[in-house]
Amino acid sequence: MEANIRVVSFFEDVAQERLIGTLIDRIAEDAGVRQRRLRREARVAEPGARVHEQFESFVKQRSDELSGPDVVLVVAIDCNCRRRNERKRQLEDKIWTRPRKGKKVRAAHVIVPTEHVAFCLPDPHIERWYIADQHAFNDVIGAGAAPKLPAYKCERDYYKNMLREALIKAGIRPILGGAEYGELIAQKIDLEQLRKADPAFESFEEELRGALKLVSSGLS
């Protein structure tokens, strides 16, 4: 009997949880990991609080279990107009200790192989992924509902407002701002289209595939 793989995720908000959670299932299936082997667990950050501090607290609280050989850790936080590598480094510093010359190094929070961690960092915001594949959006919301995806724009709430307005025009009252359709859109979205729209997705996909295969082979 094959051992289960635990995918433990930290999401910045419910919009990420609904869309990325389903994308995790799709990537795992494409990587040859049977769905029955996946045990997905998620923590969604509380709104209005500093997400990086919440993530650090999450890592501290669950350090023992995150170190398990059966665990893949997914860290999902928007880039917010920062470069992916910069945002990734900030989050890595919440997990591992980096020695700094001439400075005392604090103990690492958790001993987890870097290869077991995948960083999902939508650039600039997760709402852009919701509308990245207009065919998928129209299939879920209705013909002609998808807004035209503009060139990359770094502006607070720009894509969030665009998603919300598109749903309102389609006659939908988006109580969760569109997150209520995240799972359905993720089931239909063309992954190649998403890779082209945001290279950050491709980076996440590669990291997750590698982590799943490594953990799977170690449990065989």
Image (spheres, helix red, strand yellow):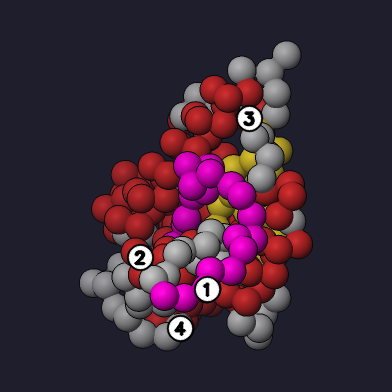
- Tell me which segment is drawn in magenta: 102-126
Q: Considering the numbered disc 2 on the image, is that residue within a helix, a strand or a loop? A: helix
Residue 124 lies in what quarter of the image? bottom left
Residue 84, labelled with which disc? 2
| Residue marked by disc 3 | 35
- Mark 3 or mark 1: which comes first in sequence? 3
Q: Position of residue 160 (x, y in %)?
A: 48, 77
**Image position of 69 with respect to 63: above or below:** above
**Image position of 78 with respect to 3: above or below:** below
| Residue marked by disc 1 | 104
CA neighbours of label 1 inside 10 A, class few (<14), some (14 to 19), many (20+): few
Mark-to-mark CA distance, 3 and 1: 44 Å
| Residue marked by disc 4 | 157
- Mark 3 or mark 4: which comes first in sequence? 3
- Between circles 2 and 3, the one closer to the viewer is 2
Q: Residue at x 59, y 69 (%)?
A: 106
Q: Nearer the viewer, residue 136 or 4?
A: 4
